């Protein structure tokens, strides 16, 4: 199913790629722009942590929108490289390195926002999700340096970006529609569910699934070496 979605998505952006090709921009240039847009999304969340109120999810919403927009550039650079036959080893390296920077900046913004508004447990899960994300990429890179193909796993980069971006968008929408919603039980010192949970529960799932994916890849390598 996911492969079908990706195939259709690549088909949908083909006209955009052809238009970009006419401008003369390089695949590495697209990759750099994607990193720049991710930095903007990080700045938005940091600003939300500094000047936004705890119940104001506009910053989270715009972070999600910008993150998804930046994620589109991950598809554009590869498609442009294939279309123009400019696939190089350095381009692949450059793309991978900037993808890691983009993801770390994304998690920096998330952790900053959550700590600033005293969601300390959620910030811990965000940090664990960041560790898992790094390890998913590292296991693949290390395996491929040993001539083992390693693209297995349920939570790769596109899934991570989509999960975070969509969760942030939904958190903003839920806040706008329902206001400051909280569901509490008497025996818990914190709300069982509130607006921010729409954003933080997917992050909690990422913390589990990214590290699970890393171990999936380790197990795959163990069976194929």
Image (spheres, rainbow, N blue to C red):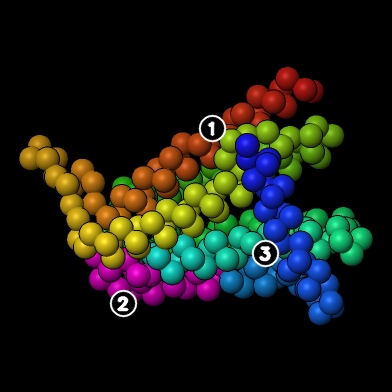
Apparent side of residue 128 relative to residue 149 in the rendered image (left or right) = left
Q: Looking at the image, which is closer to me, 25 or 92?
A: 25
Residue nearest the observer in this picture, 134 or 95: 95
Residue under numbered circle 1: 212
Number of numbered discs = 3
- Comes first in the chain, label 1 or label 2: 2
Element type where label 2 sits in the image = helix
Callout 1 touching callout 3 (CB < 8 Å)? no
Magenta residues span 38-59
- Choose between 7 and 155: the one closer to the eye: 7
Q: Residues within 10 Å of mark 3 (few under 14, many from 20)?
A: some
Residue to which mark 3 is pinned: 73
Circle 2 packing at 10 Å, graded few (<14), some (14-19), many (20+), is: few
Instruction: Indicate left or right for 138 with 166 as reference.
Output: right
Res 136 visible: no
Report which residue position mark 2 lands on: 51
């Amino acid at each position: 199913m996911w492969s079908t979605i990706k195939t259709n998505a690549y088909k949908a952006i083909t006209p955009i790629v052809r238009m970009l090709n006419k401008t003369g921009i390089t695949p590495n240039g697209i990759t750099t722009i994607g990193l720049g847009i991710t930095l903007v999304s990080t700045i938005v969340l940091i600003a939300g942590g500094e000047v936004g109120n705890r119940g104001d999810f506009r910053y989270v919403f715009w972070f999600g929108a910008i993150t998804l927009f930046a994620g589109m550039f991950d598809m554009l650079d590869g498609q442009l490289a294939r279309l123009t036959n400019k696939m190089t080893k350095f381009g692949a390296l450059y793309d991978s390195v900037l993808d890691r920077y983009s993801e770390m900046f994304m998690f920096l913004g998330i952790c900053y926002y959550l700590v600033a508004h005293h969601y300390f447990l959620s910030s811990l899960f965000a940090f664990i999700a960041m560790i898992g994300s790094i390890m998913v990429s590292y296991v693949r890179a290390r395996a491929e340096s040993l001539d083992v193909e390693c693209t297995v796993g349920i939570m790769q980069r596109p899934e991570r970006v989509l999960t975070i971006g969509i969760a942030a968008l939904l958190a903003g929408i839920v806040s706008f529609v329902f206001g400051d919603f909280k569901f509490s039980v008497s025996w818990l010192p914190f709300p069982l569910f509130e607006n921010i949970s729409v954003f933080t529960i997917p992050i909690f799932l990422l913390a589990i699934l990214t590290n699970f994916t890393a171990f999936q890849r380790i197990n795959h390598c163990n069976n194929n070496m």
